[in-house]
Image (cartoon, helix red, strand yellow):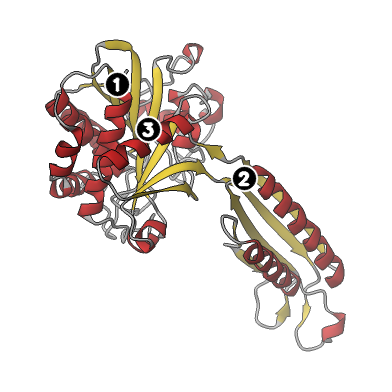
Amino acid sequence: MNDMKDIVQNLDLAEETAGQLEWLAEFGKDPKGGVSRLLYTKEWVEGQHALKEWMEKEGLEARFDEIGNLFGTLTGKNTNETVLTGSHVDTVKNGGRFDGAYGIIAGILALKYLKKHFGQPLRNIEVVSMAEEEGSRFPYSFWGSKNIVGLAKREDVESIKDFDGVPFVEAMKKAGFDFRDEAKGAHKDLKAFVEVHVEQGSVLETEKTDIGVVNNIVGQRRYTVEITGQANHAGTTPMGYRKDALYAASHMVHEIISMARKIGDPLVTTVGKIEAYPNIVNVVPGKTIFTIDVRHTDKEAIVSFTEQMTARMQEISSEHEVEMNIDLWMDEDPVPMDQTVVELIEKQCKANGLNYKVMHSGAGHDSQIFAPVVPTAMLFVPSLKGISHNPAEFTEPADLAEGVKALIGALYELGYKE
């Protein structure tokens, strides 16, 4: 048997990985400099079929499922068990070259070199280019992974349309796909899922660490808050008589962020959108709407913070004599990764001399859909300045290569060993 450490350390993957990412970025290349490869568009279809051809060229058995997830399989001796890796092929509008795409490219390359150096695995190892994760074209996210694990429902998408009025079902059928048979449920052969992804944050870059082994995906609560006061003349309304909705909202925003800063990491809280009405220079704002995004790795911590936050907002509302309506429209629990898989990945990182740290993910990923039903873990590589969903998204080729090496080690441990 070949020595895994020697093979991994001697693989020169930087140029190949970066080159394949550039190749895939041609499918949906945006005139503004980024990539726009939205679900079931012409660019998406061409990209998926090009990936299928590449998988077949590398000796993988490639196939689409009913809705357009693309699988490439390195067949194992035991075909009843499958270790899955991969990520999503869709992008945001004018997004970067790395988000999602890197996990697919890394998966194909990992299987290529496992096949070359170690031959047939004990169990199937499969790479998937998932149809959709971002929700950028239609108001629905994780269409790819939710179909794989049996969570997607036909009725969730039958009546939705994109911004141009194109129905979801029409776009899907035009692309050559259809609904899956929901009676089949989830794939029964999946034994583990490992997703490699660019970090989309700056932790690894700041700490000069090559690999992040993710042990948790944060939970999220998102709110829309509407403050109603009284619009009035900016010159004739004395300060003490005003019911200024924007002033009340700004007081709340200050308190929310101050409370979060006092608690500190891993809690993060963001007020990302504010709209004032009537938004005129000489009118006291009568209404203000703003959003709140709260994230933490612990569910109880999210609940505790948001309860304190909303109580303080009620106090401020009364103090300013304005009305407040709070709409909690997202309440997602944190999703822990499988401890056994995390430890296996750590073991391989240590054995292969890779520079890594265990960390949580502050962003959502397909892994959070898999984790409740399949033992799951994630690998991160650094993102330059933490930039993502942007044409400026970038990861150094050397860092991309380290991520592929870590994935090779993880898939070897999961796919070749008893």
Residue 103 shows in this picture: no
Residue 199 at x, y = what percent?
A: 38, 51
Q: Are marks 2 and 1 in contact (CB under 8 Å)?
A: no
Q: Could you tell whether 23 is left or right of 191 in the image?
A: left
Answer above or below: position of 213 versus 390: above
Answer above or below: position of 322 versus 162: below
Say which label, 2 or 3, has the lower sequence index.
2
Q: Nearer the viewer, mark 2 or mark 3?
A: 3
Quickly name the residue at label 3: 344
Residue 207 at x, y = what percent?
A: 38, 61
Q: Could you tell whether 54 is left or right of 79 in the image?
A: left
Q: Label 2 to label 1, Cα distance in Å? A: 33 Å
Disc 1 residue type (three-letter): Lys
Residue 379 at x, y = what percent?
A: 37, 42
Q: Nearer the viewer, mark 2 or mark 1?
A: 1
* Res 9 → quadrant: top left
* Res 67 → quadrant: top left
Local crowd size for mark 2, using a 10 Å CA cut-off: few (<14), some (14–19), many (≥20): some
**Point 65% across, 62% down: residue:** 260
Q: Are marks 2 and 3 in contact (CB under 8 Å)?
A: no
341 and 54: which is toward the camera? 341
Quickly name the residue at label 1: 417
Quickly name the residue at label 2: 298
Name the secondary structure under disc 3: helix
390 and 66: which is toward the camera? 390
Say which label, 2 or 1, has the lower sequence index.
2
Disc 3 residue type (three-letter): Leu
Local crowd size for mark 3, using a 10 Å CA cut-off: few (<14), some (14–19), many (≥20): some
**Point 51% across, 43% down: residue:** 217
204 and 5: which is toward the camera? 5
